[in-house]
Amino acid sequence: MTKPLLVAVAETDSTFEPVELDGRAAWRGKCLHCNAPLVVFKAGPQSSTVTLEHIVPRTAGGSDALANLGLACPRCNHGKGVRHDRSVRTDARSAEVVARLLEKRKRRWRDPRP
């Protein structure tokens, strides 16, 4: 069985650490945008308080590679999508936001655990 994508991203984000909540194994870390606390349970289902962020949007050629994915609170992820995802190729501000998030993801990178 493959691990859920949210868990794979949490494992590669150094702000996330393994914890146990209500008897369930989880990862606790921070939103890629605002640093709000997030929790990803190792065995679903996930709560609606964490979303998968494509830093370079799929509409702009972004992929599901772990280096292009981050975890975000729904407010931040939705806000980025509304403001920047559609114009990342043509708008300097949108491209700047994407570049900043890619750099932040790179700084937070941790090699996946076996």
Image (cartoon, grey):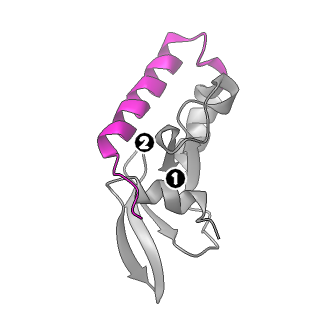
Count of marks, rendered view: 2
Up the image or down, 77 lies above or below 49; here it is: above
Q: Which residue is mark 2?
A: 33
Queried whether the magenta region covers residue 108, the answer comes back as: yes
Amino acid type, callout 2? His
Q: Marks 1 and 2, how far apart in space?
A: 8 Å
Where in the figure is residue 113, as x and y percent of width and height? 39, 62
Q: Which residue is mark 1?
A: 73
Q: Quadrant of residue 112?
A: bottom left
**Left or right, 90 with reference to 22:** right
Q: Which residue is at a point 55% across and 58% down the rendered structure image?
A: 6
- Dot 1 falls on a residue whose secondary structure is loop
The mark nearer the N terminus, 1 or 2, is 2
State which region is magenta: 86-114
Q: Which residue is at a point 32% across and 56% down the rendered structure image?
A: 15
Label 1 with label 2: CB-CB less than 8 Å: yes
Amino acid type, callout 1? Cys
Q: Quadrant of residue 32?
A: top left
Q: Quadrant of residue 104?
A: top left
Q: Quadrant location of the C terminus? A: bottom left
Where in the figure is residue 110, as x and y percent of width and height? 33, 51
- Using the image, tell me which numbered label, if any, was put on residue 52: none
Where in the figure is residue 56, as x and y percent of width and height? 56, 30
Q: Main secondary structure of the magenta part?
A: helix
Mark 1 nearby-residue class (10 Å; few <14, some 14–19, many ≥20): many
- Dot 2 falls on a residue whose secondary structure is loop
Up the image or down, 114 lies above or below 76; here it is: below
Q: Nearer the viewer, residue 18 or 48?
A: 18
Q: Nearer the viewer, residue 1 or 110?
A: 1
Mark 2 nearby-residue class (10 Å; few <14, some 14–19, many ≥20): some
Queried whether the magenta region covers residue 87, the answer comes back as: yes
